[in-house]
Amino acid sequence: MFKKILIANRGEIALRIIRTCKEMGIKTVAVYSTADKESLHVRFADEAVCIGPPSSAQSYLNIPTLIAAAEITNADAIHPGYGFLSENAEFSRICQENNIKFIGASPDMINKMGDKASAKATMKKAGVPCIPGSEGLLDSLQDALKIAHKIKYPVILKATAGGGGRGMRVAHNDEELEKGWNDARTEAKAAFGNDGIYLEKFVVEPRHIEIQICGDQYGHVCHLSERDCSIQRRHQKLVEEAPSPFMTDKLREAMGKAAIAGAAAINYEGVGTIEFLVDANRDFYFMEMNTRIQVEHPVTEEIINYDLIKEQIKVAAGVPISGNSYYPKMHAMECRINAEDPKNGFRPSPGKITVLHIPGGHGVRVDTHVYAGYTIPSNYDSMIAKLITVAQTREECIVKMKRALSEFVVEGVKTTIPFHLALMDNADFKAGNFNTGFLESSFDFSTL
Ligand code: MV4
């Protein structure tokens, strides 16, 4: 087992990783930018190294500095958390070259899954259901038109380097496809320096349901059931839950089997997530694979009573996994508490938290790095806490969430708490009647 892990991240996830390391008897090294000097991850780690000024590029994304910090502290592994360098193939490779175990995917795996068209081809070959469309990248507008006529409109153009919705265009006819082709390429080139585009049939009002998987170094892969992440706004997830209210035993078995087949085909090692679009007929299609621990991992932990970070560290150290699949025993839900103003287009609201009360009690978990008097820097993402509730049923889980949200007091900055309170009272949400278009098309933000 590792003796000392450097956590190349900040905020709640840095703290989350430190907590598991402590329980495993592993020493921890925190790294921090000057903006995070007063952060809890710095205080809770055994050692801490300042890695630069506030800007992410000069601190949490600075590879040479992170490697130097690991060397001077004698860390034998680096945990990248989510975001930042967690899916950076170069960082994974440089860790490897410096004999530091990167607790994440190999450079090869990150490259394979980071390019969406290549990820799709790989999954298709492994027998995972994929959305009909182009075989790999399009080479011209004519190519796109020909395929669109064959599979019928509506279609969607996607940037192969994309993710998060950038470089994506929907087309309902030839004219829109021509415009979309030009716009998607320009946007992809500017955003990723890569204008490779592929085409798919557009799935109307899909749900976003993802399967958590875990693979060891000996070719064993298990799945840990699903999370429903359909409650999103502008490709930012706001609420995640497990199990999905749309799930059936039959669908879970099929999706779990597909996810395991996909991960096993690439000899996947570590924790990962296979994202699927699920249509109204419960047909499901591979969308993307994430090769990192995700923000929403706690809902899975809570429904099967399993420490995903511990498992991630264990498989990275070469411990074999046991078991094949896990059946949800509970219902869990996570609300992302962001320092944003939901009444004003979710505009970021950094600043000092003057008053803070964190909810607790039975079935309530709060993963956070903030405290009263903490100043939220404007340099990083605005998530300040994850409020997770767990109960026997979805109904009880929502009741508990409302209770916990009503106890949550954050003064000094605006937060997404009023949005979550309104959502928990929304009839369609309560009925499990939602898809990825729900917030943008059916939810009334004006009543917040
Ligand atoms: C789609 C789709 C419909 N049909 N692909 C959005 C981000 C990227 N990961 C893929 N996305 C989508 N791909 C086809 N063929 C709809 C979306 C989509 C979406 C997916 C998941 C969660 C939220 C979303 C919001 C808008 C569009």
Image (cartoon, rainbow, N blue to C red):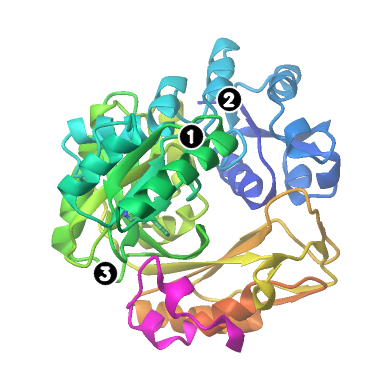
Q: Quadrant of residue 27?
A: top right
- Looking at the picture, how far across and down is residue 414, in whole percent? 74, 73
Give 72 or 441, whichever is nearer the viewer: 441
User: Secondary structure under badge 3?
Assistant: loop
Q: Is mark 2 within 8 Å of ligand 1?
A: no
Give, as a single range, the part of the protein colored magenta.
424-448
Look at the image and tell me whether residue 198 can be seen.
Answer: yes
Q: Which residue is mark 2?
A: 77
Q: Is residue 343 left or right of residue 315?
A: right
Q: Is residue 75 left or right of residue 365?
A: right
Determine the CA span between mark 1 and mark 2: 9 Å
**Answer yes or no: do the residues labelled 1 and 2 have beta carbons within 8 Å?**
yes
**Answer yes or no: do the residues labelled 1 and 3 have beta carbons within 8 Å?**
no
Q: Which residue is mark 1?
A: 313
Q: Which residue is mark 3?
A: 246
Determine the CA span between mark 1 and mark 3: 32 Å
Q: Quadrant of residue 274?
A: top left
Look at the image and tell me whether residue 273 can be seen.
Answer: no
Looking at marks 3 and 2 on the same chain, the residue that comes earlier in the sequence is marked by: 2
Q: Amino acid at mark 1?
A: Ile
